[in-house]
Image (spheres, rainbow, N blue to C red):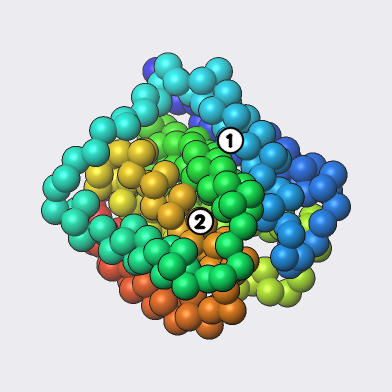
Amino acid sequence: MNKSPLLFKGMISIGIFTLFAVLGMLHLGVKYIDPSFAALWYPYEIGLAVTAVALWYTLLRKEIALNFSMNFNKDFFITLPIVLIPLLLLVYVLFTSETLENEKLAMFFATSVAVGIAEELTFRVAGYRVLLATGSSVKKAILLSALLFSLFHLSNIAAGQGVEIISQLAITFMMGVVLAYIYYKTESILYVIIIHFMWDLSLFIVTAFTNADSLLNAVSIPIVIGYFIWAMRNVLKLKK
């Protein structure tokens, strides 16, 4: 089988998805650092999720099947804190914040679901899975897909993000490695979508309804770095 067309379709999927994200931010016209950005962005993010599903269905589904089953194996339990810790942060906010707004909660929930679906289908499927299917080693596919995931966030420049984007690129690269490695070990697209969803939802809600940004950073950054070190050590040991 000639693998070049599949690689081309995967890169076209990522390119179209990125273009739509940039056009959406330009059309929205709200700065990324604006507190209202996440709430206003949710219709665009839902559109991106629909785009990602449509791109997979039309371009990739025949070669790249999706596994939505959950295998409760050793790797699942090793990575379970990545889901549980954001969940605990959410519970903390829901029980302590006096400024909760049901409408905003619903928008943040919808946005987080859409982000999880859109970015996992694009970067773990059209990225990692396509690279793997077209001859890349697991190690190379994980690292390249993480780099693509990180570089995608340069699109936030269209929403006025400045030099602070450098730290976001570093964090998203680390999370890209972690998510791709978890996907490699569990083979469950559903599980990485859930992880992505939980992290974004906790970020949106803690930032919007509390003054606990320092708590969020104190909890999330060590977790990301710790799991990145764990994932990278295992990725570098891979012989395939």
Q: Position of residue 27 (x, y in %)?
A: 84, 44
Residues packed near mark 2 inside 10 Å, few (<14), some (14 to 19) or many (20 plus): many
Q: Marks 1 and 2, how far apart in space?
A: 16 Å
Residue at image location 25% in from the left, 47% down from the top: 185
Residue at image location 66% in from the left, 45% down from the top: 42
Amino acid identity at mark 2: Leu
Q: Position of residue 155 (x, y in %)?
A: 71, 53
Q: Position of residue 113 (x, y in %)?
A: 51, 43
Residue at image location 43% in from the left, 55% down from the top: 198
Looking at the rendered image, the disc whose residue lies closer to the viewer, 1 or 2, is: 2
Rendered image: mark on residue 115:
none
Q: Please, what secondary structure does the residue beneath circle 1 have?
A: helix
Quadrant assignment, res 45: top right
Quadrant assignment, res 170: bottom right
Task: Judge whether residue 113 can be spotted in this image.
Answer: yes
Marks 1 and 2 in Cβ contact (< 8 Å)? no
Given residues 41 and 27, the one toward you in this image is 41
Q: Please, what secondary structure does the residue beneath circle 2 have?
A: helix
Given residues 172 and 191, the one toward you in this image is 191
Quadrant assignment, res 153: bottom right
Residues packed near mark 1 inside 10 Å, few (<14), some (14 to 19) or many (20 plus): many
Name above or below for residue 227 compared with residue 154.
below
Task: Judge whether residue 147 can be spotted in this image.
Answer: no
Quadrant where the image shows the N terminus: top left
**Which mark is first along the chain, 2 or 1?**
1
Given residues 138 and 163, the one toward you in this image is 163
Amino acid identity at mark 1: Ala
Q: Position of residue 220 (x, y in %)?
A: 44, 72
- Please indicate whether residue 103 sits to the left or right of residue 70 in the image: right
Residue identified by numbered label 2? 201
Residue identified by numbered label 1? 49
